[in-house]
Image (spheres, rainbow, N blue to C red):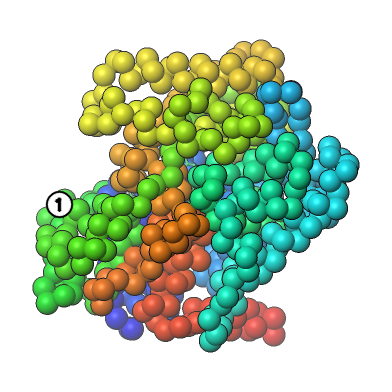
Amino acid sequence: MKGSAVIIGGGLGGLFTGAILSKEGMKVTVIEKNATIGGGLQSFTRFGEVFDTGMHVIGGMQEDGNIRRICRYLGISDRVHVENVNPMMIDSLYFAEDRKFYRIAQGRENFVEALAGSFPDQRQNLAAYTDALFRIVDSLDMFYLRPASDYLTVHSEDFLMAADSFIAKYIPDERLRSVLAYMNPLYGGRPGMTPAYIHALISVLYINGPSRFAGGSILFAEALRDVIVENGGEVISGDGVEHVSSADKLITGVTTRKGRKYTADYYISAIHPCTFISLLDDPSVLPKSYRTRLDMIPVSYSAFTLNLKLRPGTFRYMNWSGYYMSTYGDIWNFGRSDREWPLGFLYMTPPEIGQGEYSTKMIITAPMTWDHVKPWENSRYGHRDAGYEEWKAVCAGKLLERMEELYPHFRDCVEAVNSASPLTIRDFYGIKEGAMCGYSKDCNNMALSQVPVVTKVKNLLLTGQNCNIHGFCGVPLTAINTCEAILGRNYVIESIHRYENSRKQV
Ligand SMILES: Cc1cc2nc3c(=O)[nH]c(=O)nc-3n(C[C@H](O)[C@H](O)[C@H](O)COP(=O)(O)OP(=O)(O)OC[C@H]3O[C@@H](n4cnc5c(N)ncnc54)[C@H](O)[C@@H]3O)c2cc1C
């Protein structure tokens, strides 16, 4: 054994970090507060249907995708059930302002051609913009699972520009700029702030081909758990960490709600850093300036979700995702609470294993700021007043009304409605303000936006969406960073390469 690690939080970050460390010979204990593991990978059953909570569209799972390669190294690739989407239309965008639809296609050339169909005079600009996206991503070794270079990486001017300025640099057409920014709600985009590299990463992931979990994202969490258990580790659920103790500038143990104590050589926080700090018996183990900094970083906006059970045989399964946008001008305004809600939303029909012609469910995710739920911010799940339920019903009604614009009589297809607000996200995952993408990044102040996985406490590391990039692709790549901070530089990347080479030889 190469030592032991206690990981606080059994979401995507905690489970991936745990799976890699246990595969590499460490004794791992993951502690999850909820009865069900997975965090954003959690699924739940309502009205007899399985709904995913925070992982609807995922990148990196194509045969040569980075996350698919990590899954092969972990030995879980065959256990992952994903459906790829229709390559000729991965996404359909609708702008209510002029009732126009746009088609987004998979693959660099198809992507350009599909949009050039709507903006013929922009073909060359679209090609230059797409090249620039791929150039930015190519400068990120980790994205391609390349060993980190010994040289200091100097990023291009595009890399750290604000995403909206980056788009504007290549695209003079105002409407096309808004169309190209359609995915910014998926990364909590803010105008003048979100760095172009975040926009490039998410765009390239989806241009390369998005996928969706079939049969529930929880199956993926369970596959990661099994890697940990099969390698001698433990994944404990339903017992959150309540205290983290320290002495002599080291973490010495954690105590759970049920009073159990766990000790290890390393402690890894896979929860929101501010939540972690609130668990420290002696916060001064971390410098005050560091704690203040973590507290000051703004978090991304949250979301309101509708989980719909559809009447059998009434709504065809969509092997693409739909985006409803109110206006072109508001495309970067999802983080503003002074605009009429909803400014837009994503709607999709999650696949079943062996999906048929019709869908039995739909998930609608609409970005929402924390301000909307402030009247109830001091309430707890299961103890909110009737006013909250009334407000949720109004929000649900607004989303269904927009869906009727796209599909007349859509309400007739809906058998039952369940909804979740930013409060649900905060209470279930322990995420500050129910942030959909963790900490918000600001290209004007990267020192404040990037949280290293190492800390001043030698045996304390961080992982999860708040360190680098959120989401299904970003969090596992950060997990590699965290593991390599313990195992050694490029250790995991080289293990992945060794595994791939041995596979090729067989
Ligand atoms: C509504 C919504 C939709 C999203 N859609 C997508 C999408 O389509 N595609 C995509 O790639 N990303 C999506 N995301 C983002 C994605 O879900 C997250 O980036 C990802 O799940 C973060 O993983 P994590 O491990 O960092 O955090 P989490 O998944 O939040 O895991 C943290 C875990 O720690 C646990 N925990 C908290 N406190 C304690 C404690 N004291 N003790 C023990 N455990 C504790 C929590 O219960 C949780 O299980 C979405 C997010 C939301 C909210």
Q: Residue 94: x and y, percent? A: 70, 30
Number of residue marks: 1
Q: Mark 1 sits on what residue?
A: 258
Looking at the image, can residue 350 be seen?
Answer: yes
Q: Which of the 4 image quadrants contains residue 294?
A: bottom left
- What residue do we see at 69% from left, 81% from top? 504
The quadrant of the picture occupied by the C terminus is bottom right
Residue closer to the observer: 337 or 360: 337
- What residue do we see at 60% from left, 51% from top? 163
Q: Which of the 4 image quadrants contains residue 71?
A: bottom right
Residue closer to the observer: 180 or 453: 180
Q: Which of the 4 image quadrants contains residue 249?
A: bottom left
- What residue do we see at 40% from left, 31% from top? 421
**Callout 1: few (<14), some (14-19), or many (20+) C-alpha neighbours within 10 Å?**
few
Mark 1 beta carbon near ligand 1 (under 8 Å): no
Q: Residue 445: x and y, percent? A: 44, 59
Three-letter code, disc 1? Lys
